[in-house]
């Protein structure tokens, strides 16, 4: 017969054994968890690498398998929704480049964000002087981070329009518009829609060249038009058919954005700065007039058409003319063709390139004669801006228009 103490001792023994087993079990669990995490990490980096090599293999244009160690980061330029952009130096040839670090968050395809995948694919497939060049795709030290290496551009048009001491001249607006239209025409020719054209996605260098960037929302269109998400294009640049819930859309949505950009280049303020989709629509209709059965028969069938109140302004062009009194008749015509409510009647990029606005005086300015501006992306400041721009404005031969 065992005494109470012996039983307790035995129980203690059991208890001690339990604790030991528990500790071992926990240790094993921890190891298993670590192993799983390592596997996941490996899978993620393998997936990123896999996607990367898949993309790299599609064309011989890019160099292969460089790492971030080849670049020295100089400063952060901007943090966008899909990535952080840095200015950096290529240690091998001292060239200044831009690095866009891909944010690894939601919507992954095999461990890689779909927006970045789209950006890489479209930048590789559509190359043009006025589309930012993708030089490489490199991985970070852990093999998990992915960076897009792009040519560096001193400005984006949103920052420039906000900070520049005086408006672009008409001749400069024409040059900028021609470059933008040439890039959009090429994109559309390859059946791509950008779906987020706006001044902050247009980059400019100090030799008067602009390039379209940020292809995170770009995608290729097939015929017949696929059912696409309507959650595209920043509100102020979003076409009315998207705001009205059209079930399908096409290249015309980019042309609407180009119209809004044209107006903004002329006045340096956004044309339709709505606070909500409905507010955006009412701003558009107040300015351009309400569609009629003749001008846009399909409008009345669109899902949100009944929610929009009919504005008092009836004339299609009256507001447009008075808002841009300095613009010639040809300029008004181009702007109103870009800002045509009915997408079926909106001008295409190819057609816009042939528009008489670009051949009448003042003629488009040679980009090499554009003034240069201090670059925020390079960390140059307003003080330098004033001093440099004063100098530039007095030393650059600027014709009256
Ligand atoms: N190649 C480049 N050279 C210089 N600056 C650049 C370059 N690419 C991007 N930037 C700067 O970084 C900003 C954000 O880049 P981008 O639009 O590609 O990122 P994003 O995350 O998709 O941004 P968002 O969602 O805010 O539009 C640009 O507006 C521009 O100021
Ligand atoms: Mg952007």
Image: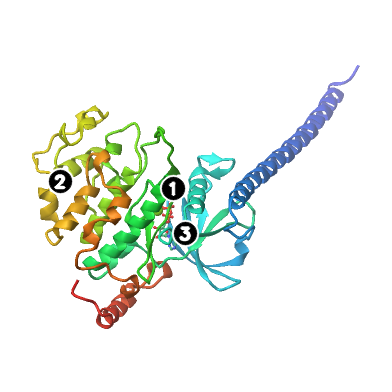
Q: Is mark 2 within 8 Å of ligand 1?
A: no
Which disc, if any, is residue 85?
Answer: 3
Q: Secondary structure at mark 1?
A: loop
Q: Are marks 1 and 3 in contact (CB under 8 Å)?
A: no
**The one of 382 and 286 positioned closer to us in this rendering:** 286
User: Separation of disc 1 and disc 3 at Cα?
Assistant: 27 Å
Quadrant containing the C terminus is: bottom left
Of all residues shown, which one is farthest toward the right?
A: 1
The answer to whether residue 268 is visible is no
Quadrant assignment, res 34:
top right
Q: Is mark 3 within 8 Å of ligand 1?
A: yes
> Dot 1 surroundings within 10 Å: few (below 14), some, or many (20 or more)?
some
Quadrant containing the N terminus is: top right
Which disc, if any, is residue 287?
Answer: 2
- Relative to 37, say whether 248 is above or below: above
- Relative to 152, say whether 52 is above or below: above
Residue 326 location (% of width, % of height):
13, 62
Q: Earlier in the sequence, mark 2 or mark 1?
A: 1
Which colour scheme appears in the figure? rainbow
Quadrant assignment, res 109:
top right
Residue 193 location (% of width, % of height):
39, 45
Q: Secondary structure at mark 3?
A: strand
Q: Earlier in the sequence, mark 1 or mark 3?
A: 3
- Relative to 144, say whether 313 is above or below: above
Q: Which residue is mark 1?
A: 190
Q: Residue at x 29, y 59 (%)?
A: 177
């Amino acid at each position: 017969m065992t005494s109470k103490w012996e039983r307790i001792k035995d129980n203690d023994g059991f208890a001690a054994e339990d604790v030991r087993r528990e500790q071992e079990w926990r240790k094993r669990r921890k190891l298993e968890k670590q192993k799983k995490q390592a596997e996941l990490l490996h899978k993620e980096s393998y997936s990123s690498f896999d996607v990367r090599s898949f993309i790299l293999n599609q064309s011989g244009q890019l160099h292969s398998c460089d790492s971030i160690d080849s670049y020295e980061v100089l400063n952060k330029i901007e943090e966008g929704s899909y990535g952080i952009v840095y200015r950096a130096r290529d240690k091998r040839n001292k060239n200044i480049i831009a690095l866009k670090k891909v944010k690894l968050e939601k919507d992954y395809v095999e461990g890689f964000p779909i927006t970045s995948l789209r950006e890489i694919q479209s930048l590789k497939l559509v190359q043009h002087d006025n589309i930012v060049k993708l030089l490489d795709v490199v991985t970070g030290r852990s093999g998990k981070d992915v960076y897009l290496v792009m040519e560096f551009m001193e400005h984006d048009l949103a920052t420039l329009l906000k900070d520049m001491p005086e408006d672009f001249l008409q001749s400069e607006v024409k040059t900028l518009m021609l470059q933008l239209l040439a890039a959009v025409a090429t994109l559309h020719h390859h059946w791509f829609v950008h779906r987020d054209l706006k001044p902050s996605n247009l980059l400019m260098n100090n030799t008067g060249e602009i390039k379209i960037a940020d292809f995170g929302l770009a995608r290729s269109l097939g015929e017949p038009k696929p059912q696409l998400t309507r959650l595209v294009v920043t509100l102020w640049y979003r076409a009315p058919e998207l705001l009205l819930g059209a079930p399908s859309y096409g290249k015309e949505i980019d042309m609407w954005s180009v119209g809004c950009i044209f107006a903004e280049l002329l006045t340096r303020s956004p044309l339709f700065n709505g606070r909500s989709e409905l507010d955006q629509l009412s701003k558009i209709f107040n300015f351009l007039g309400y569609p009629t059965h003749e001008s846009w028969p399909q409008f009345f069938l669109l899902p949100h058409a009944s929610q929009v109140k009919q504005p008092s302004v009836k004339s299609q062009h009256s507001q447009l003319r008075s808002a841009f009194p300095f613009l010639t008749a040809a300029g008004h015509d181009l702007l109103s063709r870009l800002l045509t409510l009915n997408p079926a009647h909106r001008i295409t990029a190819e057609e816009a390139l042939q528009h008489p606005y670009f051949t009448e005086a003042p003629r488009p300015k040679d980009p090499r004669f554009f003034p240069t501006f201090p670059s925020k992306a390079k960390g140059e400041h307003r003080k330098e801006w004033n001093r440099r721009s004063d100098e530039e404005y007095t030393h650059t031969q600027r014709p009256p228009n």
